Each structure stands twice: as C-alpha cells, then as structure tokens.
Amino acid sequence: MTGQQLPASTLAGLLGTWSDDSGPAYRSLAERLRLLIADGRIMPGARVPSERELTDALGVSRTTVASAYRELRDRGYLVSRRGSGSVTSLPSKVEPELGRHHAPWIDTVGLYDFTCAASPSVPGINSAVAEAVEDLPLHLATPGYHPQGLPELREEIAASYRARGLPTTADQIIVTAGALAATAIAVRAMTQIGDRVLTESPTHPNSVDTIRRAGCRVVGVPMSPDGWDLPLLEATIRQSAPRAAWMVVDFQNPTGRLMSAADRQRLARAFARARTTVIIDETLYELPLDGQEMPPPFASFDPQGVITLGSVSKSFWGGLRIGWLRVPETLVARILDARASLDLGAPVLEQLVVTRLLRSYRSVLPERRAALALRRDTLAAALHTALPSWRFTLPGGGLSMWCELPEPVGSSLVGVAQRNGVLLVAGSRFSPDGGLESFLRLPYTLDPDTLRDAVERLAASYESLTAGPPLRRTAAMIA
C-alpha cells in the first residue's frame, strides 16, 4: 500500500475488533493502528483516511479519531501535512521491526531469533573455499562477468535435475545471486506492469514484495488445513487468468506442506490450459527430514511452461548467495534480457565454491537433515508441553513450523515476546492480503536447548497476553 490511498472501509476491516474497555477509546484505536504499521500490514507511506472518513467508517466520535491520529504523530507512526493529509511512517527506531530487516547474531544479540528460517553453514565450507581460491587465478584475466553463470556450475546443477528425471542441459541454467534474485528476474521477464501473479496464502513475504515491486497484482489463494485446495486453485486460475504464478510445492514456506505428484500433475494441467507461466521455488527441496521419497519436479509435468528456481541458501549456507533458474529452452534469451537490467552475474568465487559443494552434497546433507529433524522434534515436544492449546502439523521437511493460536493475537504477541527476549514474525506478514492473525511461523534452526528455553519464554509471553478479559487481548502494548 506504499504511496497509495488507504480507503476507510479497508482500514476498518484491518482494524477488526480494536476497542478496549480498560482505557480511552482513542488510545485503543491508536495502539491497534500502530500494531498494523509496525507489523507491516499497513506499509510506510500509505495515505490514511481523513478524520471524517474514518469516523464515519468506524461509527465513533470525531474526537476519538483525531486523538488517535495525534498520538500516532507524537510517536512517529504518522506524518501529517496541511492540505496533503496524513501518511504512515516508522520512527527512527521501531523495535518490533527487528524481525523484518536485521542481521542475525549481530543486532539480535541476547535475543532468541524466530524470524530467520536459515541454519549456520554445513561442514566443508572452508575446504571448498580454499579449493576455489586455488582456481580463481584462472578467471582473473577475464572481466569476471558471467550473466548465465560459470559453465562448470551450470553443468552440476543441470546434472542434479537429470538425476531427478527432468532432462536438462547446462544451457537451460542461469545462475543468480540467490533465490530472491531469481524470482525478481523471472517475474520481470514473464510479466508486465498490471499483470496478475497467483501465489499461495500464506507464503514467503519477501517474494510477494518482489512480485509487487515489479508492478504486478498478487492473487493469493488460501491454503486449506490439509495443504493446497486444488478446486479453489483451479477456479481462481480460470477466473483471474494470471499471467504467471509463483509457488513453493516442496515443504512450502511457512506451512511445511509437500505437494503430491498427482496434485502437481493436476495443477500443471490447469496452468497450461490458462497459458500461465509457473515459477516454482525449490529452495527447500533438499531438506526432507523423514527419509520420504520426493515427488518428481513440478516442471516434469509441463517442461515448456514451468520455470524452476533453486538455491544453496537453505541447504548449505545463506552467506554464499548463489541461486539459479532452470528455464525452458525457448525462454532462455528472454530471461537473460531481463536479467541484464538487474545485474551482470553472480560472484565468481562463490560460484566456484558452490560447484565443489554440489559435487559432495551426498556426503554433507545427511548430517544437515539429521540435525534439523532433531530440532524439529525438540520444538514440537516443547510446544506440546508449554503451549498445548497451539495447533500444528509436524512438517515432513523444510525449516519451520506453522502454528495456529486459539485466538487472533499474533501481532500483539510479537511485541510482548520481544520484551521477554524472543523475536517473532506475526502470521499476517505471510499473507498477501492481510489476516492470519491466529498464526505464527516458528523456525527450528536454533539448537535444541535454545529452542526449549525460547518456547518457555514464548509460553510466558502468551500467558501474560491472554490473561486479561477477551477484548483486551488484541490491544497488548509493544515496547
């Protein structure tokens, strides 16, 4: 909503039940608005309704709205200019925003960080770097720009797809600076401003932001408690005719769901009928935790209509910043043209490192999976003990657990938990359209002892938040 007028009716819907009988109405309204801004559901720069418009929409007094706006201005969440109205803002330091833009282990020292679904590096990074440095001189006599990627790395990636039954040549691989960069390139290549892009809800928020910044309209399709709602997806594809779709079908982030082969085939047919280009994010593909057999790649069911992106960020280490696109032959030139306006290629040294890691992944990843399985089970046991009213389905892989709370207090819990030393991201951040206040994503990437302690603090935070009367539960203060 950045830079756009926020209609009064839309804002009233976002506010939901905001009244708190324990204090003045204007203070409850200001606090609820502040939570929406701090949590990212109302983006900075959005123009809020006038006092009169919001008064009519909420059915309250003009004084209540005027006083709420004044309190938001005093706290730095609203900027008003005579004749121009008021727009949302963020103070110079907004503590709940730590979980949205921060450097893990640097500005979160002393806090248990549940905002970052990523693990430390696997063993062997140092050795791979040392070997790569030995080969680096061969590339120093060149300009160092490789828009498609180093040939040896592209061949390793192509070979991994062939091993999964998907014929792929090195010419179909484009190496990028991570999965998010791959998303940006693919969306820019396959869409124009104003096009619709379909995705799941909930889903990865940074990827949704990337799609929107390309000028596209995001069409979010709610997932059911059991995973993807195929009839709803098919109906939405028919009705909205999206130009593209962006989906995660391997341990979906944040729900952890794995789409079956039959559902992949059915959904691929629906997209093909609509001539929708599908962008499939396989970043979490390498992280099955129960020894299960993985379904075929989504692209197997429509090789000419599916773009697949991958990355080593979740499986090896995020610090490498290497991802890639597997592209149908007919789209390679188009993707490279789009890429030229974003960057000129991924770093050479990191590509050399990843080439070596991919050659030895069979000896490295089992240890990673075993450690994650232990941490997942530890988190599940701690939640069952300390927060038995929270519901979740144990994911078969990936890096996080999607928890449903008994009440819609996710945004409020973010601030209360931070005071107790736990960083969270509310479920609403994972929704393209708002809502999901009854959900939280909890990564299981911390060590087991830390997970247990963090859940104890989280349980104490939740108990303090829900101890009061029902109307007060959605108006907890964030320090």
Image (cartoon, helix red, strand yellow):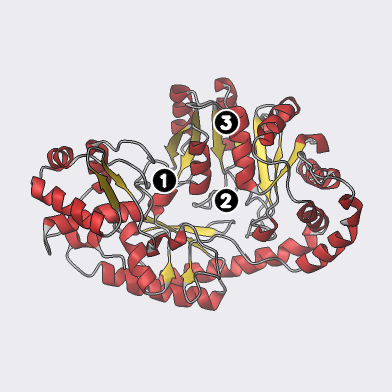
Q: Give residue 23's position: percent from left, percent from top.
A: 12, 63
Near-viewer residue (404 or 417): 417
From the viewer's perspective, tell me whether residue 175 is left or right of residue 88: right
* Residues at marks 1 and 2 touching, judged by CB atoms closer than 8 Å: no
| Amino acid residing under circle 2 | Phe
Residue 5 lies, with reference to residue 15, above or below; the image says above
- The residue wearing badge 2 is 251
The amino acid at mark 3 is: Arg
Q: Secondary structure at mark 2?
A: loop
Quadrant of the frame with the N terminus: top left
Say which amino acid is labelled 1.
Ser
Q: Nearer the viewer, mark 3 or mark 2?
A: 2
**Residue holding disc 1:** 431
Q: Looking at the picture, tell me which residue is in the foreground, 211 or 155.
A: 211
> In which quadrant will I find the C terminus?
bottom left
Residue 165 is situated, as x and y percent measured from the top left of the image, at 77, 39
Q: Which residue is mark 3?
A: 266
Q: Which tag, 1 or 3, sits closer to the chain's start?
A: 3
- Write the residue at 44% across / 28% down: 236
Residue 410 left/right relative to 376: left
Q: Residues within 10 Å of mark 3 (few under 14, many from 20)?
A: few
